[in-house]
Image (tube, helix red, strand yellow):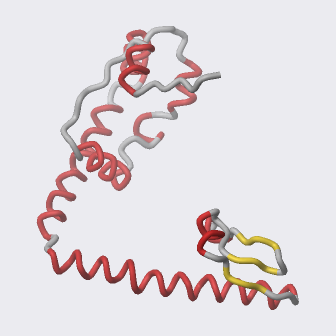
Amino acid sequence: MPTIKMNNAELAAEVGTRTPSFPKYTTQIMNLANQNAQGTRPLVVGQMSKLLREFGGNSYEEWEAWYRERMPDALGEATRRVFAMVGKLKDAIGRIDEEMVRQWVEDLVLVKTFIGFCLQEAILLRVATEKGTDYRASTPEEESRGIDGYIGGIPSYYSRHV
């Protein structure tokens, strides 16, 4: 069976909705602002999966009207939260200079990498010692598959849960 590909605009048209066009990078900034402001959390906009199950209509227009009636202040509150955070991000972006970026890159590439490697080694050693077995760090190829190391010959995936 051939692979069927559908982009967001095609999917939106298929289900009878519209997809606004946004300038480049703006949605990334709004997503980051929303993550920080928690503007679209269930506390603000409702538990969407629950609301969609309760919704009895079939079309997007019915859904939009039903949601707006059920949650009249939700979209406005979410907008206020996210927009306020966009303002804070604008301020923060204005403070970033090349020296700050250099320091951030060095911290990420040098400091955090070193600390992370030491932490991996310490965890592998601790678990292996407690189990009375040997350990080894993973190879770069094994790391690319999500394996952090081996304890007693068994792959360890601990960094996904830390």
Question: Does residue 162 appear in the picture of this structure?
Answer: no
Q: Residue at x 43, y 21 (%)?
A: 11
Q: Residue at x 65, y 89 (%)?
A: 122
The image position of residue 135, as x and y in percent, is 77, 85
Relative to 117, 45 lies left or right = left
Q: Position of residue 71 (x, y in %)?
A: 40, 26
Q: Nearer the viewer, residue 75 or 28?
A: 28
Query: Is residue 111 in view from this perspective?
Result: yes
Quadrant location of the C terminus in the rendered image: bottom right
Q: Quadrant of residue 93?
A: bottom left
- 62 sits to left or right of 133: left
Q: Is residue 34 above or below residue 127?
A: above
- Across and down, in percent, residue 14 comes to 44, 13
Q: Is residue 96 above or below residue 69?
A: below
Q: Residue drawn at (29%, 77%), measured in percent from left and top?
A: 104
The quarter of the displayed image where residue 53 is located? top right
Residue drawn at point x = 40 percent, y = 41 percent? 40
